[in-house]
Image: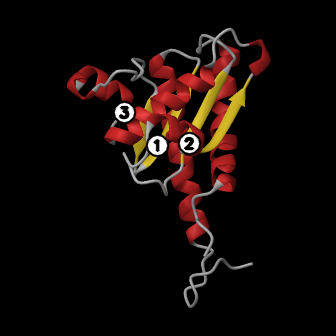
Amino acid sequence: MASIFDNVVCNEAIEMAKTGIVAQMEKGKFKRKDLCIVVVNPSIVPGSISRTEFVRRGILHEHVIGDKDKWKTDYSWFAKYKAYLTWRHRMSSRMIQTCFPHLLEDGDILYGGSIIFNEIVVAASALDEHDDELVSLWVAGGIYRECIAKRRTLDPNTNAFLA
């Protein structure tokens, strides 16, 4: 059986969230019009691979808003390392940094912006930390919604997706 949680679900969720994201960018609520969003592969057991390996194969989906070639900072790198911290400890990067600093290790990122919602890990980078976190929540909520919608298309007799 194909996985319910896949790139199609991630794309749908990000497209839903993107309307709000771009609207807030246009209103000037967010500090820039660039953004990187990453979604963690849910099939990889938390803490089972190294940070380097996680960056290579732990990201199921990455989405960029803005022109990545014009970025002065690699927001993708920041988003991936925020995601790694949340994936490893099963709590938001802000929670780890403010309430559980004893869990931090050499090389861990010291910025917020990644969340875990119903075991869905999403991170964003390029905005203020609280805005990165908001975007991550919007995307994770959309993924959850899309997974529910996709589950409803399963044939109850075979558990295969209906055409």
Q: Is residue 45 left or right of residue 104?
A: right
Q: Does dot 1 land on a helix, a strand or a loop?
A: strand
Question: What residue is disc 3 on?
Answer: 92
> What is the three-letter code of the residue carrying label 1?
Val
Of residues 51 and 119, which is closer to you in this image?
Answer: 51
Give the color scheme: rainbow, by chain, secondary structure or one colour: secondary structure
First in sequence: mark 1 vs mark 2: 2
Residue drawn at (75%, 21%) of the image: 68
> What is the three-letter code of the residue carrying label 3?
Ser
Whole-percent x, y for residue 21 in the image: 64, 28
Whole-percent x, y for residue 35 in the image: 64, 23
Q: In this view, does 11 lie to the left or right of 143?
A: right
Q: Residues within 10 Å of mark 2 (few under 14, many from 20)?
A: many
Of residues 15 and 111, which is closer to you in this image?
Answer: 111
Whole-percent x, y for residue 59 in the image: 57, 43
Q: Which residue lies furthest to the bottom in this view?
A: 157
Q: Does dot 3 land on a helix, a strand or a loop?
A: loop
Whole-percent x, y for residue 26 in the image: 71, 17
Question: What residue is disc 1 on?
Answer: 121
Dividing the picture into quadrants, the one containing residue 106 is: top left
Residues at marks 1 and 2 touching, judged by CB atoms closer than 8 Å: yes
Q: Specify whether residue 136 is in view.
A: yes
Q: Does dot 2 land on a helix, a strand or a loop?
A: strand
- Disc 2 to disc 3, C-alpha distance: 14 Å
> What is the three-letter code of the residue carrying label 2?
Val
Residue drawn at (33%, 42%) of the image: 90
Residue drawn at (75%, 78%) of the image: 163
